[in-house]
């Protein structure tokens, strides 16, 4: 009887281990199914600020950025990148335009990505013809100042004003930054004077001010400027080195690295 019981326990333990190994293997297999074979057109970095904000960063060339519709949790999209702007349902409420074409519909269409809905908000613009970044406070694609309407992209958010300590809080309030003082997951876009663009997502909860301070303390490069993107459960990242899922909600738009499917 005792031997039979020992044998039963041993078989049970082996069965549990087999299931565990199978689950681990399936998880790894699924990750490879989504990301294997994609061009690795970015540099990855992790950092923790003195305030204990954990930042995951992807550095990309502006020419390798593709603003695109997602419509799914990013984990299910076969592309490297992070979440984009604000949305409600299937409507995109932040500017997301490539070469004068919004990513979620027709120009001038509500929810298409042509507008920063309701408010003029900080919009990060890459002027491909001029080879220059800027943050422009705009209500729609019509307001954007670019050299060539066929060679630019623009991503809406909320101005960070990294170079203007005296302005950032008032500007964030005027642009209606959601949940500014609450502990939330955060995401953002930041460029530096060398022309490098950083895609940022936190793994830790923080206020907008704590996130902004962490950006100033940990993101490499001088002359940095940028925008807050959508946050909380929408803060998601697909990288080969780390996958941050937020609360796994579908997001309407993502900022992708060229080479996705």
Image: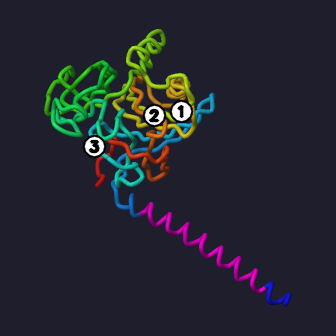
Along the viewing direction, whichever of 10 and 135 lies nearer the viewer: 10
Q: Which mark is residue 150?
A: none
Q: How many C-alpha atoms fall within 10 Å of the one at disc 3: few (<14), some, or many (≥20)?
A: many
Which residues are drawn in magenta?
Answer: 7-32
> Dot 3: what SS?
strand
Q: Of all residues shown, which one is farthest toward the front?
A: 89
Mark 1–mark 3 distance (CA, rounded to whole Å): 25 Å
Q: Are marks 2 and 3 in contact (CB under 8 Å)?
A: no
Q: Quadrant of the C terminus?
A: bottom left
Q: Quadrant of residue 114?
A: top left
> Going by the image, does 135 lie left or right of 217?
left
Along the viewing direction, whichever of 178 and 57 lies nearer the viewer: 178
Horizontal and vertical percent position of residue 100:
16, 32
Q: How many C-alpha atoms fall within 10 Å of the one at disc 2: few (<14), some, or many (≥20)?
A: many
Q: Are marks 1 and 2 in contact (CB under 8 Å)?
A: yes
Horizontal and vertical percent position of residue 135:
32, 22
Residue carrying label 1: 184
Mark 2–mark 3 distance (CA, rounded to whole Å): 18 Å
Q: Quadrant of residue 148?
A: top left
Residue at image position (47%, 9%) is 166
The overriding secondary structure of the stretch rendered in magenta is helix
Q: Quadrant of residue 134?
A: top left
Residue carrying label 3: 68
Horizontal and vertical percent position of residue 181:
54, 22
Residue carrying label 2: 231
Above-or-below relation of 83 to 29: above
Q: Nearer the viewer, mark 1 or mark 3?
A: 1
> Going by the image, does 196 lie left or right of 144?
right
Q: Does label 2 or label 3 sit earlier along the sequence?
A: 3
Horizontal and vertical percent position of residue 112:
23, 35
Residue at image position (30%, 52%) is 260
Mark 1–mark 2 distance (CA, rounded to whole Å): 7 Å
């Amino acid at each position: 009887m005792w031997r039979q019981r020992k044998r039963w326990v041993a078989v049970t333990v082996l069965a549990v281990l087999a299931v565990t190994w199978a689950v681990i293997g399936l998880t790894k297999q699924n990750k490879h199914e989504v990301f294997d074979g994609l061009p690795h057109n970015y540099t990855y970095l992790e950092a923790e600020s003195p305030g204990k904000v954990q930042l995951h960063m992807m550095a990309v060339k502006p020419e390798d950025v593709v603003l695109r519709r997602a419509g799914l949790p990013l984990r299910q999209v076969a592309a490297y990148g992070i979440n984009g702007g604000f949305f409600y349902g299937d409507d995109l409420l932040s500017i997301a335009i490539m070469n004068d074409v919004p990513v979620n519909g027709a120009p001038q269409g509500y929810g298409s990505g042509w507008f920063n809905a309701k408010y003029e908000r900080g919009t990060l613009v890459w002027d491909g013809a001029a080879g220059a970044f800027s943050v422009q406070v705009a209500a729609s694609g019509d307001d954007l100042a670019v050299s060539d309407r066929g060679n630019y992209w623009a991503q809406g958010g909320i101005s960070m004003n990294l170079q203007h300590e005296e302005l950032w809080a008032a500007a964030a309030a005027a642009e209606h930054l959601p949940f500014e003082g609450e502990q939330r997951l955060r995401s953002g876009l930041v460029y530096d004077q060398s022309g490098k663009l950083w895609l940022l997502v936190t793994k830790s909860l923080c206020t907008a001010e704590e996130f902004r301070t962490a950006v100033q303390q940990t993101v490499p490069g001088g002359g940095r400027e940028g925008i807050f993107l959508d946050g909380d459960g929408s803060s998601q990242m697909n990288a080969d080195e780390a996958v941050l899922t937020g609360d796994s909600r579908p997001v309407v738009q993502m900022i992708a690295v060229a080479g996705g499917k």
